[in-house]
Image (tube, rainbow, N blue to C red):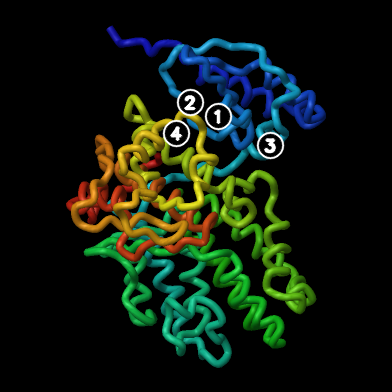
Amino acid sequence: MTAVRPWDAFTSAEAEVRAMVADPRWQGLSVPDRAHVLAARVLVTQDGDRWLYGAYARWHLYDPGDGRWHPAPPPRGERARRVQHAAAVLPDQVVPTGPDFAAEPGSTQSFIGPDVPPGVTEQIGEMVRGAGRKPELDYPLTAFGEIFAADVPSTVAAVWGTIMWCAYAPAFDGNERLITLFGEYLRRSLPGDEWVRWLPAPPLLDLVTLVAERLRAGRSRAALRLAALIADTAQVLLSDIRFRPRALALLTMVEPMLRRPGRDDATALRGDDAVRRVWLERCPPRLALALLPETDPDAYFAHSVYDLVEALGFVDDAPTAAAAYLADLSDSRRLLPERLNHRLRRAYGELERAGLTGTSAAERTEPEGFAVRPGGVPVPPVVTPPDRESKAAVLGAAYATCLAWGRLTGAKVPQHGLAGQSALVRELIHERDDHHIGHT
């Protein structure tokens, strides 16, 4: 006989809330009325924790310690029952707007293990070769100077910047052909350990600067060429789900400029950040989750942690497993605990008391940075995912969490990676040539 999966209260609640939000009448309800409907569908688990399926089509956990609702994946498989929660104490930010439930599906998989598909790499290669033939005097390098040599035209930087901005977590293995396309243009070797390239995620402002500088210089055709390169690169990246959500957002920002040349000329005179704000305003609400790195660093970190815990859902105690990766964050100002829900905070606190976190006095740390563990300093044990896809998914989510921490605190990711992630990388090295992409 085929085993029947036990009834899952969380799955049932998700389906019910999704149906309500998809109903056209949802848009006509006031926010208090929407909150009232949601409050009647709060679930409580046997330990007393309260869960709400809300904004961004994600679960939120009520923290009795601070009274806040934190984005948090639920403990699926646990028994839960519906309770009536006071609608008045549901904050507006956890109430779905409607469009936020239509976000593009993505993947937390890193580019270590599953490579970028050959078709994508070939199309990007053609763009890079064409971009490299442009004269640098017409396309000066106004951003990404730490990556490329001074005589490299900004057309090459536009393709690179689009790839890195659209990537969920830009960590690539040394065998990744997409990265080797840029080899002849690099100022110096890319950062990384023996074969992993832990690359920074550029801010949108860097891409904007390439275009806006040309507009201010009166070189509108060059500016349009750069914008077209950004759009063309994003269009190619759409076919890989690890790029898709942000690639779609970038297309939405850039294409209006291409459809109506001159649209951003006056804005560029007010500065690069003014253009950045205009680009962000063009994105519809359904793409808001992809823009969190630019619009809300706090929320970006919270949702990155959500992804990490969800990627670790194959273990019985995912918060404890996630805490082992959070232990790589240095936190001298105690910014981290207040940003964690009570389940994560408890697990992280246990590691902290054992001297296994980035605040340990035994470690060298950068202020508000990442733990650099010298020889002999213990590292929290990290779980080993059961297969290649889940390994890549955990690695991508862990690296994205570190990038989010850097965006929040100003810290720079160490060039040779972090202890927890490096331990997981060793499990994937032998699979570096695998081109398969999962849909985690």
The first of marks 2 and 1 along the sequence is 1
Residue on which disc 1 sits: 59
Q: Which quadrant of the view contains residue 257?
A: bottom right
Q: Secondary structure at mark 3?
A: helix
Residue on which disc 2 sits: 74
Marks 2 and 4: which is nearer the front? 4
**Residue 306, position as x, y percentages in the image:** 48, 38
Residue type indicated by callout 2: Pro
Residue on which disc 4 sits: 344
Residue type indicated by callout 3: Gln
**Residue 354, position as x, y percentages in the image:** 31, 38
Instruction: Compare residues 100 and 239 and report the one nearer the observer.
Output: 100
On the rendered image, what quadrant is the C terminus found in? top left
The first of marks 1 and 4 along the sequence is 1
- Picture residue at 50% right of the left edge, 54% below the top: 238
Residue type indicated by callout 1: Trp
Q: Are marks 2 and 3 in contact (CB under 8 Å)?
A: no
The first of marks 2 and 4 along the sequence is 2
Q: Secondary structure at mark 2?
A: loop
Residue on which disc 3 sits: 93
Instruction: Compare residues 102 and 415 and report the one nearer the observer.
Output: 415
Q: Is residue 164 above or below residue 73?
A: below
Q: Residues within 10 Å of mark 1 (few under 14, many from 20)?
A: many
Q: Which quadrant of the view contains residue 149?
A: bottom left
Q: Are marks 1 and 3 in contact (CB under 8 Å)?
A: no
